[in-house]
Amino acid sequence: MGLATGVMQGRTNNSQRTKYPWRLSLAVACGLALWGTVPCAGTHPTPEWNPTLGPPAGAKYVGDAVCAECHVAEAKNFSATPMEQAGEWARDAAILKGHPKLTFRWGPYNYRIIRQKNESTYSVSEGKRTISVPILWAFGRGEAGQTYLFRYQGAYYQSMVSFYNDTQRLDITLGAPRRLPLSLALALGARLTEQGTRLCIACHTTGALIGGQFHPRQAVPGVHCEACHGPGGAHLAALQAGNITQAKRAIFNPGKLSAGRLDDFCGNCHRSWMKVELMGVRGVRNVRFQPYRLELSHCWSPTDPRISCLACHNPHQPLETSEAFYDSKCLACHLVKGQLPNAQHPGRACPVSTSHCIACHMPKYQLPGGHFAFTDHDIRIVKPGAPYPG
């Protein structure tokens, strides 16, 4: 409602594969690169700063409090944002503190998370055998759920079970296989590769990667200012020296990126079009990957800032949940009844409604076992009974 029908006509489930065919070729090329046959470096433009790779050696983080001295408005409500709440040390996790005993049974396996003093222990039992490990990290702010990270026999693991807010109980972690594990060790959860561990921690914390080295114990829980803008040490030093030009060069501003590059930047953690294509995630399971879904929209353009992540979301503010809030974002492109399309507003007026656009054009989908309805960012005309596209 509120989004035009004309902009969306002729859309197919593979709109972006048709609209930007070079992307599919690039995805294939980069997929081959993973097997060591085709070099992928430099074939796809990437922002100057990537939080999943970290800064060079010697970079200095200064912390949110220092940033807030100048950026008062951005810092004012940041502590209430999903990004700031993306990760916690287990000892500080409010959900674990508030639920000192959590249990779940799956076939022959019994799961328990027990809180004693400042430590939460994750245990899996089968008959008389038990594996118990201390939880290190709690990832997710708990609106949908919270998943746990721990170490076992020298490797990091993602817990097989997660806490879900709707039931206030444990259940199988979203994305985990729904078939019973074949052994107690496999029932613990997903064993992460070194790269997977770095990506997981880098996307829920700040400062874990410096100079290519992984320092998880130095990570600051949550996605803070310098996770997106890069370390502020050089920026601060230039300001103190009165060199404004150098200060601007020493800090990264994602807001200055084009729509396409911005979506790829956010997609470093929220999963970009390229990442999802390479992962091969099809069907409703990819509804969680917002940049990917947004780029499937027929009206998406890599050069139009009105259809980018930041067009609707301010990462410095708590997430807006009111449908009506987003109407003005839609009307930046679309007209109201009685108006004709023009260069500034190419989208026709919606014949059905003038408000609550996203209720119809960005439907919510409940993933199997997900305990949460995810908003689909593939903006489109949704016909009753139509299958999930993509």
Image (cartoon, helix red, strand yellow):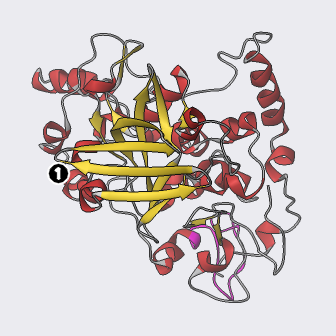
Farthest front residue in view: 128
Instruction: Provide the residue designation for mark 1.
Output: 72
For the residue pair 241 and 180, the one nearer the viewer reads as: 180
The image quarter in which residue 236 lies: top left
Q: Give the dominant element type of the magenta stretch: helix, strand or loop.
A: loop
What residue is at 49 percent from the left and 30 percent from the top?
A: 199
The image quarter in which residue 373 lies: bottom right
The image quarter in which residue 201 lies: top left
Query: Is 88 situated left or right of 52 in this image?
Result: left
Magenta span? 330-346
> How far across and how far down the image is residue 62, in percent?
18, 29
Query: Is 123 situated left or right of 249 in this image?
Result: right
What residue is at 45 percent from the left and 21 percent from the top?
A: 153
Q: Is residue 257 visible?
A: no
Q: Is residue 311 magenta?
A: no
Query: Callout 1 environment at 10 Å: few (<14), some (14 to 19), or many (20+)?
Result: few
**Where 147 sits versus 338, above or below?**
above
